């Protein structure tokens, strides 16, 4: 259980990788014909990548909440942009959304009882 108690750098690196995969998901799924789905994947992937980088440098709780929100948005995207009924991109986005939400929940759990000052001391720049 101690493994889950501390926010580790690999979690932020994994978040950056997930953001990159989200941005590339329309091409990985072979479905880049829906311009809205592609733009959404690029924007959400870029934001997830940026937030994970920001967490790596300066650790704050709002970043994890924002990542969870982006995960929820990514899960809703196939229904909002009309590609829920066809192709594999919806599976890519649902799976990646679940991964992002779980990662954000883990990081939020790890940092829940840590004070803002202690989070600042845990930042990678100050190490």
Image (spheres, rainbow, N blue to C red):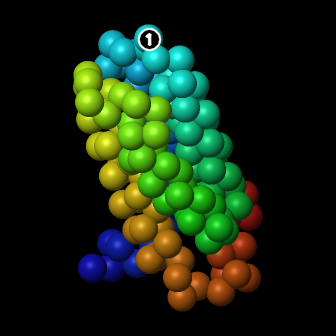
**Observer-nearest residue: 64 or 97?**
97
For residue 27, above or below residue 112: above
For residue 112, above or below residue 34: below
The image shows residue 89 at horizontal and vertical percentages of: 33, 27
User: What is the quadrant of the C terminus in the image?
Assistant: bottom right
Q: Crowdedness of circle 1 by 10 Å Cα count: few (<14), some, many (20+)?
A: few
User: Is residue 32 in view?
Assistant: yes
Q: Is residue 44 left or right of residue 115?
A: left
User: What is the quadrant of the N terminus in the image?
Assistant: bottom left
Q: Residue 77 sits in which quadrant?
A: top left
The image shows residue 83 at horizontal and vertical percentages of: 36, 28
Tally of numbered discs:
1
**Observer-nearest residue: 4 or 39?**
39
Q: Is residue 2 left or right of residue 112?
A: left
| Residue drawn at 40 percent across, 25 percent down | 25
Residue ID for mark 1: 33
The image shows residue 91 at horizontal and vertical percentages of: 27, 35
**Observer-nearest residue: 14 or 65?**
65
The image shows residue 98 at horizontal and vertical percentages of: 33, 52
| Residue drawn at 53 percent across, 17 percent down | 35
| Residue drawn at 53 percent across, 77 percent down | 111
Q: What secondary structure is marked by label 1?
A: loop
User: Is residue 20 in view?
Assistant: no
| Residue drawn at 33 percent across, 13 percent down | 30
């Amino acid at each position: 259980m101690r493994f889950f108690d501390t926010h580790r750098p690999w979690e932020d690196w994994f978040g950056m990788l997930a953001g990159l995969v989200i941005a590339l998901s329309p091409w990985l799924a072979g479905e880049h014909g829906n311009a809205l789905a592609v733009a959404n994947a690029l924007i959400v992937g870029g934001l997830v990548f940026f937030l994970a980088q920001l967490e790596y440098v300066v650790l704050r709780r709002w970043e994890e909440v924002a990542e969870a929100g982006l995960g929820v948005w990514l899960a809703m995207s196939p229904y909002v942009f009309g590609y829920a009924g066809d192709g594999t991109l919806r599976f890519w986005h649902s799976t990646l959304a679940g991964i992002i939400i779980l990662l954000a929940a883990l990081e939020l759990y790890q940092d829940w009882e840590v004070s803002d000052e202690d989070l600042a001391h845990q930042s990678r720049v100050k190490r």
